[in-house]
Image (cartoon, rainbow, N blue to C red):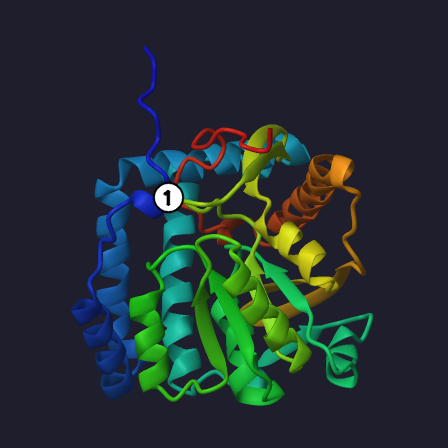
Amino acid sequence: MSEQPAAHWAGQRERGSYALMKLTAVLARLLGRRLISPLIYAIVLYFFVFGAQARRSIWQYQANLATWSGRNELRPTWRQVFRQFMSFADTLLDKLDVWNGKLGLEQITLVDPHDLRGQLHRQERGQMLVGAHLGNLEVCRALAELGEHVTMNVLVHTKHAEQFNRLLGEAGASHLRLIQVSELDPAIMLQLSERLERGEWLAIAGDRVPLHGGRNVSVDFLGQPAAFPQGPWLLAGLLHCSVNLLNCLKIDGRYQVIIEPFAERIEWKRSEREAVIRQWVQRYAERLGQRCLDAPLQWFNFYPFWNAHDDTSA
């Protein structure tokens, strides 16, 4: 029996609305996490029960991770899949805590053995930070508000995040900007270059292929071919900026923000561009796989990651 083509993640209808998101944020502020938690868990439980594709996608992820790593204890069961959904609910509650000022820097451990944070402050020009939908990137974004006091520009491919971005603005997040990047047109490139020159940071996820105007490349991820976007690496090369990796994982009940060097420069000759980009994407996929092992239940891509897209690098 052949499977139906999977819908692109960006084309799937959002299950929530702005009104529901705003109501949840207001209730969390007024009632606190303890009282709002049952509502969040009920919503995610509904998502688990009626989201067949999401369940299959997490099962596939857990199976690939177990096989790739040789760790049998990571093999999927329905209980393990359900635990991953509950981990997502916990992350949603933590996001509300961040933007309500209830999760401060004193509750976050910064893992930065190369002192990249110091370099970011010492250098006049900004840099690019590449993250993933692993762990809680909201905590990383909040650093711009809570402690770093630099402007962080989060580049997004779709409008899914815009409603939540409105809530962030209402919460007073003045150092955080979400910029929709549908394609790398000259106007966007000029804007991003100017922001880098002002010392601002660019942050982008390296594990989501855009719906329109984006090119992707298929590389090995957890032992299976998967499509990753070329965008972050094309941007870094065209903007002549260095790239660091940024992850935020909840380990033993405490968040760890992990920042590590990745590429000082991404350069290519015109005839070599595709090969160079593929090489960097493969390196990124390998590093992402290692990070998944640090927090196996904190991978939050609830769509068929390994068979949803075709390679468009050719």
**Which residue is more in the foreground, 290 or 185?**
185
For residue 260, say whether it is visible: yes
Image coordinates of residue 108 in percent, x first then y, are 59, 78
- At a point 58% along the width and 68% down the height, the residue shown is 190
Q: Where on the picture, by quarter, is residue 303?
A: top left
The correct choice, above or below, for 4 with respect to 107 in the image is: above
Image coordinates of residue 28 in percent, x first then y, are 27, 80
Spot the residue most to the front: 186
The correct choice, above or below, for 262 with respect to 193 in the image is: above
At label 1, which amino acid type do we have?
Trp
- At a point 34% along the width and 19% down the height, the residue shown is 3
**Which residue is more in the foreground, 210 or 40?**
210
- The mark tally for this picture is 1
Image coordinates of residue 199 in percent, x first then y, are 67, 81
- At a point 41% along the width and 50% down the height, the residue shown is 83
**Which residue is more in the foreground, 204 or 37?**
204
Quarter of the rendering occupied by the N terminus = top left
The correct choice, above or below, for 99 with respect to 140 in the image is: below
Quarter of the rendering occupied by the C terminus = top right
Image coordinates of residue 31 in percent, x first then y, are 24, 84
Residue at image mark 1 = 9
For residue 77, say whether it is visible: no
Q: Where on the picture, by quarter, is residue 7?
A: top left
Q: How crowded is mark 1: few (under 14 residues within 10 Å), some or many (20 or more)?
A: some
- Which structural element holds mark 1? helix
